Image: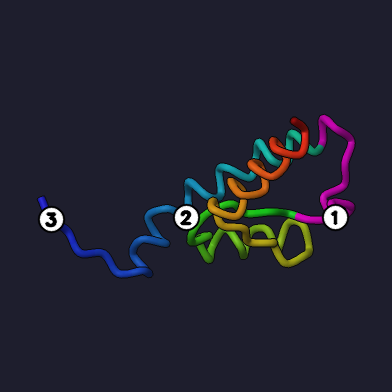
Amino acid sequence: MQVKLTRAKLEQLVDDLLQRTMAPVKQALADAGVDPRKIDEVVLVALDAHAKVQQLVREFFGKEPHKASTRMKSSRSARRSRAAS
């Protein structure tokens, strides 16, 4: 099967899933006693962080998310491993 999706349709399809991911985030912060506005930085690790995810981060945490590529994360981990050796 082959289906063409517009970006708008894709966003509509994943919206519920993205909204449901916020409940565990809220619960984890509540369990830790941490105010979301007190978080210094939110890092999204993906090659193409979804625009809706970025919007949710902005709205919930009140700040612009930092977008890191997987390649950047891997490079940092490798440098830390070499430094620890």
The correct choice, above or below, for 85 with respect to 8 in the image is: above
Secondary structure type for disc 2: helix
Kind of residue at disc 2: Asp
Residue at 61% x, 62% y is: 54
Residue 51 shown left or right of residue 35 in the figure? left
For residue 8, which quarter of the picture? Answer: bottom left
Q: Quadrant of the C terminus?
A: top right
Q: Residues within 10 Å of mark 1 (few under 14, many from 20)?
A: few
Upstream in the sequence, badge 3 or badge 1?
A: 3
Secondary structure type for disc 1: loop
* Marks 3 and 1, how far apart at CA: 43 Å
Q: Which residues are magenta?
A: 30-41
- Percent position (x, y) of residue 11? 42, 62
The correct choice, above or below, for 48 with respect to 27 in the image is: below
Q: Which residue, given by chain and number where applicable, does mark 2 sit on? A: 15
Q: Which residue, given by chain and number where applicable, does mark 3 sit on? A: 2
* Marks 1 and 2, how far apart at CA: 26 Å
- Percent position (x, y) of residue 67? 63, 61
Kind of residue at disc 1: Asp
Q: Are marks 1 and 2 in contact (CB under 8 Å)?
A: no
Query: 46 and 28: which one is in front?
Result: 46
Upstream in the sequence, badge 3 or badge 2?
A: 3
The correct choice, above or below, for 42 with respect to 7 in the image is: above
Q: Which residue, given by chain and number where applicable, does mark 1 sit on? A: 40
- Percent position (x, y) of residue 27? 73, 34
Residue at 68% x, 58% y is: 57
Query: Is-magenta flag for residue 13?
Result: no
* Marks 3 and 2, how far apart at CA: 22 Å
